[in-house]
Image (cartoon, grey):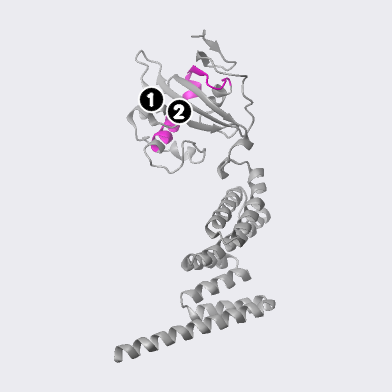
Amino acid sequence: MDAALLLNVEGVKKTILHGGTGDLPNFITGSRVTFHFRTTKCNEERTVIDDSKQVGQPMHIIIGNMFKLEVWEILLTSMRVSEVAEFWCDTIHTGVYPILSRSLRQLAEGKDPTEWHVHTCGLANMFAYHTLGYEDLDELQKEPQPLIFVIELLQVEAPSEYQRETWNLSNNEKMQAVPVLHGEGNRLFKLGRYEAASAKYQEAIVCLRNLQTKEKPWEVQWLKLEKMINTLILNYCQCLLKKEEYYEVLEHTGDILRHHPGIVKAYYLRARAHAEVWNEAEAKADLEKVLELEPSMRKAVHRELRLLESRLEEKREEERLRCRNMLG
């Protein structure tokens, strides 16, 4: 075992238990770092609080992504791949650990569908809890103390080497991702891959919704984002029509029109959904609204009206035959 090494950080002491391989990795912003960890108390028994190997799944964090326990980023960036090191961390670095531990335990217990990565959102709300749901963590929360982290660094991946999830992207990256996702959704839609296209549109919507929360409602930038969101939702609705999920189309288009009653495409898609579920009056009313707002869509509207009349006539004929058979 190497002698204890002090990092250039107050309240942290490092001891290398097993040397790593190669040079120190390039820990650039956005890199994904995968590792196993064991957290223990500093008592004689070295009481184990958490152990990722017992859970059976390593942890990963994204460098520069405001991880809840900031000191872990400092510890990890001092390590080589395959290195195992023990870090003693003073109370100034461990105060938030009980909250992190609570999140990790819930994930391990299957109470959250995501993997072992921890978002910063909701952190403030957790402070409001009188209990974290685990006695040892409640004790640690009431009386913060130094902790020991034994960490094994497994892998460091540059941002280009793995598929980054939407929540991992910066604001600029989210905005840059939207047209790419939109275009990919359109391409998949043309290929008839409606489920895959839906997923792309949804991912783009999530990016924009996240950006929109940072703007003041109904101000210029917020409205710009709202317009982009509505476009994507309507593309998503086209996928839903293809998948015959008509009531969901009615829900989404209705929501858009409640807030933005001048969007022609929303009336058109809602009319088609109404027609599919035999809401004749509502379908015709929406098609009339399309004509009112966009007279150039006359051909498309008349086509939909003819289709609606044809389907209604077929339905009426089926009902006549059914009545005749019952009487016969």
Check the picture and name the quadrant holding the C terminus: bottom left
Q: Position of residue 322 (x, y in %)?
A: 35, 86
Q: Position of residue 305 (x, y in %)?
A: 57, 82
- In the picture as drawn, the residue positioned furthest to the top comes out as 3
Q: Residue at x 46, y 20 (%)?
A: 150
Q: Residue at x 60, y 60 (%)?
A: 191
Task: Establish if 234 lies above or below 325.
Answer: above
Other residues around mark 1 within 10 Å, as few (<14) / some (14–19) / many (≥20): some
Residue 92 belongs to the span the image colors magenta? yes
Q: Which residues are magenta?
A: 78-106
Residue 274 belongs to the span the image colors magenta? no
Residue at the disc numbered 1: 49
Question: Tag 2, which secondary structure?
Answer: helix
- Of 156 and 135, which appears nearest the observer? 156
Residue at the disc numbered 2: 97
Q: Of the residues shown, which amino acid type is indicated by label 1?
A: Ile
Asked if marks 2 and 1 touch (Cβ < 8 Å), the reply is yes
- Of 314 and 148, which appears nearest the observer? 314
Q: Of the residues shown, which amino acid type is indicated by label 2?
A: Tyr
